[in-house]
Amino acid sequence: MSIKNILYYSFYALLFLNIFFLSAIVSFQITLKGEMVTLHNLVGKSLEDAKAELLDKKLSIVQSGVLLHESLERGKIIHQDPPPGSKIKINKVVKVILSAGKEKVFVPQLVGKNLQYISQILKDAGLRKGKISHVHTSKYAAGKIIAQHPLPMEEVGRDFRVSLLVSQGQKEKKYLMPDLIGKHVAKVIAKLKQMEFNVGELSSSYYPGLDSGIIINQSPSPGSRIQKRNLITMEVSK
């Protein structure tokens, strides 16, 4: 084979190889440029976790804003663009909006206030009534608030439920109701009033064989546990 032919074939071989590699590079770039990935749901994730997840898909992320959110804590993703399930090309940017948390409000001073007015006070402060517990105490009148959680001026999220401890007043003693049947009503009433029991109006009925003013019926019944504020009623003979 002549030198001319050798050079001729060598030229075309090199040309073929150049065209082959050039085509491969162009094809790879076209493939790379057009490669699609499915975007997962990023809502509820932190920016760092979402960034790591998108890096595996050859995507990048950028924060485009911050908004208040009722349920997701500060720093969590509440919105993404494109939305979950979208198919996008690699090397694209995903925009996200982060939560700024709930709107913050201050807890008002509630201790010493009456429970019946608390609902409106809490509503005006952007809060709600939480668990209500009761306890007997001589320091506060019945219905007064004696403790609260959270404490006054503590900063909490809007619509937070405030728990309250409410006074039931001083605990009343309980007494065993005596048997009054057959006793003279005048003496019984005098004794009960002396002890500051609550005595109701008398009723009367004829009862054969008894003098007038003898107790023939009573309420509460003998042996019942009563407090001084409970009404005691009696029926007497005429």
Image (cartoon, rainbow, N blue to C red):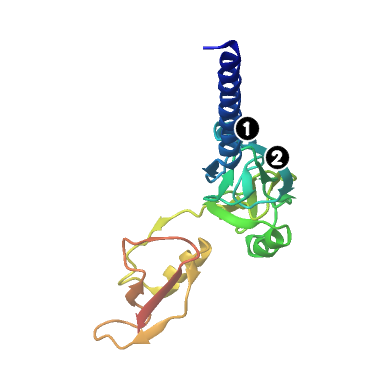
| Quadrant hosting residue 141 | bottom right
Foreground residue, 20 or 36?
Answer: 20
Q: Secondary structure at mark 2?
A: strand
Which of the two residues, 136 or 236, is positioned nearer the viewer here?
A: 136
In this rendering, the count of numbered labels is: 2
Specify the amino acid type for callout 2: Val
Is 16 situated above or below 171? above
Q: Nearer the viewer, residue 96 or 144?
A: 96
Separation of disc 1 and disc 2 at Cα? 11 Å
- Drawn side of residue 30 relative to residue 200, left or right: right
Does the rendering let one see residue 154?
no
Q: Quadrant of residue 237?
A: bottom left
The spot of residue 142 in percent (x, y) is: 60, 58
As drawn, is 10 to the left or to the right of 106?
A: left
Q: Picture coordinates of residue 71 (x, y %)?
A: 59, 50
Q: Which residue is mark 1?
A: 48
Name which residue lies at 52% across and 52% down.
171
Disc 1 residue type (three-letter) = Glu
The percent position of residue 197, horizontal first and vertical second, equals 49, 65
In the picture, the disc for residue 62 is 2
Percent coordinates x, y for residue 125 in the rendering: 73, 57
Q: Nearer the viewer, mark 1 or mark 2?
A: 2
As helix, strand or loop, the secondary structure at mark 1 comes to helix
The one nearer the camera, 2 or 199, is 2
